[in-house]
Amino acid sequence: MYRKAVLRRMLSAYDASKRYNVDLLGAIHLLKISWKELAASKVANCFAHAGFSRARVSDPENDQLNEDWTCSDLHEAVHKIADREVEGDFETFAVTDATPPVVDPKVGCGDN
């Protein structure tokens, strides 16, 4: 959600022929917006997966956010901004936060 918000702002700045720079206040504002868009069921499911709750919460209305842009739209727009081929797979970048990895509590986080 944060990346999506950053991409939207980059595209808005580009459309206005301006350069977009993320400052601390802007980053905090984007985090606030992203947090508000996050469905409560996703947070509850993360806690459930970590073992803090046994029940999974389902909120089908908020499970899939309405997308204003398709990946191909964003890919094309980023190519316009960069005016060159962007390294890596754009779709992977754009949807990185859609399915973040969750560490199994039994495995740990590398603490030996």
Image (spheres, rainbow, N blue to C red):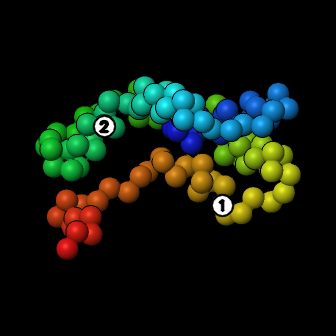
Query: At which x and y percent is residue 43?
Result: 30, 37
Q: Is residue 37 above or below residue 112?
A: above
Residue found at x 71% / y 43%: 74
Q: Using the image, tell me which numbered label, if any, was put on residue 89.
A: 1
Q: Which element type, helix, strand or loop, lies under badge 2?
A: helix
Q: Amino acid at mark 1?
A: Asp
Count of numbered badges drawn on the protein: 2
Q: Which element type, helix, strand or loop, lies under badge 1?
A: loop
Query: At which x and y percent is residue 39?
Result: 38, 30
Quarter of the rendering containing residue 111? bottom left
Query: At which x and y percent is residue 26?
Result: 57, 30
Report the side of 17 relative to 72 (left or right).
Answer: right
Quarter of the rendering containing residue 60? top left
Tell me the quarter of the image containing the C terminus.
bottom left
Mark 2, Cα crowd under 10 Å, few <14 / some 14-19 / many 20+, is few
Report the side of 58 relative to 5 (left or right).
Answer: left
Residue found at x 84% / y 46%: 80
- Label 1, label 2: how far apart the Cα atoms are: 28 Å
The residue closer to the viewer here, 102 or 17, is 17
Report the side of 76 relative to 59 (left or right).
Answer: right
Residue found at x 52% / y 52%: 96
Q: Is residue 2 visible?
A: yes
Reading the image, the residue beneath label 2 is: 43
Q: Amino acid at mark 2?
A: Val
The residue closer to the viewer here, 22 or 62, is 22
Q: Is residue 76 visible?
A: no
